[in-house]
Image (cartoon, rainbow, N blue to C red):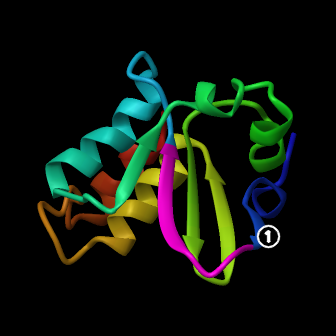
């Protein structure tokens, strides 16, 4: 398997800032990420089908996510592009980055938070 650091890829980019969630409505894992986007009112993350890149096994998509799975969050900060695979990791990124808007979604109880991590 891939290590955490090799799963999150960083590449140089053009000076444009944007975030894209590559996902399809039929993806249950992606639904976790979409729920956070919708309920928190996050509008600066665009949802795009991986089919727009030729599908999950296309050279372009595999260049961003070698696992060839969805969802994938691609974040362009204007200097670098960070590609984050795995719905749990994407959700944690979204909850941390957008912690100042919308509902919190996190229980303020250490034991409960540990239990929810076991799945």
Question: What residue do we see at 44% from left, 33% from top?
Answer: 30
Q: Quadrant of residue 77?
A: bottom right
89 sits to left or right of 105:
right
Residue farthest along the top direction in this orientation: 26
Residue 95 % position (x, y):
33, 63
Q: Nearer the viewer, residue 109 or 62?
A: 62
Residue 114 visible to an observer of this rendering = yes
Please tell me how many numbered marks the rendered image carries: 1
- Quadrant of the rendering where the N terminus is positioned: top right
**In the figure, 4 relative to 58: above or below?**
below
Residue 8 % position (x, y):
72, 60
Q: Nearer the viewer, residue 6 or 78?
A: 78
Q: Which residues are magenta?
A: 13-21
52 sits to left or right of 39:
right
Question: What residue do we see at 79% from left, 70% from top?
Answer: 11
Q: Nearer the viewer, residue 103 or 55?
A: 55
Q: Which residue is mark 1?
A: 11
Q: Quadrant of residue 94?
A: bottom left
Q: Quadrant of residue 80?
A: bottom right
**In the figure, 49 relative to 43: above or below?**
above
Q: SS at mark 1?
A: strand
- The magenta stretch spans residue 4: no
Crowding at mark 1 (Cα within 10 Å: few <14, some 14-19, many 20+): few
Residue 27 % position (x, y):
46, 22
- The magenta stretch spans residue 19: yes
Residue 79 % position (x, y):
67, 84
Residue 66 visible to an observer of this rendering = no
111 sits to left or right of 89:
left
Question: What residue do we see at 48% from left, 38% from top?
Answer: 48
């Amino acid at each position: 398997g891939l290590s955490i650091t090799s799963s999150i890829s960083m590449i140089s980019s053009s000076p444009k800032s944007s975030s894209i969630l590559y996902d399809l409505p039929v993806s249950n894992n992606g639904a976790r990420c979409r729920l956070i986007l919708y309920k928190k009112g996050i509008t600066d993350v665009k949802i795009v089908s991986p089919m727009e890149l030729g599908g999950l096994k296309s050279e372009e998509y595999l260049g961003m996510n070698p696992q060839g799975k969805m969802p994938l969050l691609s974040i362009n900060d204007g200097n670098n592009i960070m590609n984050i695979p795995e719905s749990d990791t994407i959700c944690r990124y979204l909850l941390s980055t957008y912690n100042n808007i919308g509902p919190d979604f996190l229980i303020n109880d250490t034991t409960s938070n540990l239990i929810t991590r076991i799945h």
